[in-house]
Image (tube, rainbow, N blue to C red):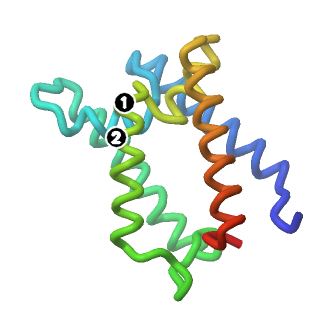
């Protein structure tokens, strides 16, 4: 377990919870990334500035991390998947989050904190699907 980081994980979880609380308290919205991003693609969304700021903050935060501590970000290598596979996976995730009514951040962080049964079912489904996918990828040579 070379990458066991309980303190960093706890701090990261606290920051995610704090951010979700601020978004809910200030904007009255669940901080589900897929829902916020998806709203940028809808016509007539009156809260586009909020949505652009939220998504932009994710991008800018990642860029700043890449400058300040690039070793914390994964780097592309010869073993990285081809870009078409990454784009295809992203589109499938987007489709799934729209079909499931939210993403792991919306259901797993915000929904569970509200004791939502629907979010519990969604989060268990996300976790089981991820576990099965990781097992199959490892079993059949897709991951190490």
Q: Is residue 26 left or right of residue 70?
A: left
- The secondary structure type at the circle numbered 2 is helix
Q: Residue at x 39, y 67 (%)?
A: 85
Q: Residue at x 42, y 46 (%)?
A: 93
Q: Position of residue 74 (x, y in %)?
A: 58, 72
Residue 95, which numbered label?
Answer: 2
Classify the position of the N terminus by image quarter. bottom right
Q: Position of residue 79 (x, y in %)?
A: 56, 83
Q: Which residue is nearer to you in this view: 128 or 76?
A: 128
Q: Residue furthest front?
A: 140
Classify the position of the C terminus by image quarter. bottom right
Q: Residue at x 40, y 16 (%)?
A: 28
Residue position for label 1: 99
Q: Is residue 134 left or right of residue 82?
A: right
Q: Residue at x 64, y 18 (%)?
A: 113
Residue 83, which numbered label?
Answer: none
Q: Is residue 128 left or right of residue 106?
A: right
- The secondary structure type at the circle numbered 1 is helix
Q: Which residue is nearer to you in this view: 115 or 85?
A: 85
Tell me whether circle 2 and circle 1 mark residues in contact (CB < 8 Å).
Answer: yes
């Amino acid at each position: 377990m070379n990458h066991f980081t309980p303190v960093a994980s706890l701090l990261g979880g606290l920051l995610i919870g704090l951010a979700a609380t601020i978004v809910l308290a200030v904007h009255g919205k669940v901080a589900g990334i897929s829902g916020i991003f998806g709203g940028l693609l809808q016509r007539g969304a009156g809260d586009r500035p909020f949505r652009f700021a939220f998504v932009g903050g994710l991008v800018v935060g990642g860029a700043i991390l890449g400058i300040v501590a690039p070793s914390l970000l994964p780097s592309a290598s010869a073993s990285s998947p081809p870009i078409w596979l990454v784009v295809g996976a992203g589109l499938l995730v987007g489709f799934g989050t729209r079909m499931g009514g939210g993403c792991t951040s919306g259901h797993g962080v915000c929904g569970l904190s509200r004791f939502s049964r629907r979010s519990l079912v969604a989060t268990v489904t996300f976790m089981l699907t991820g576990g099965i996918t990781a097992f199959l990828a490892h079993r059949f040579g897709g991951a190490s």
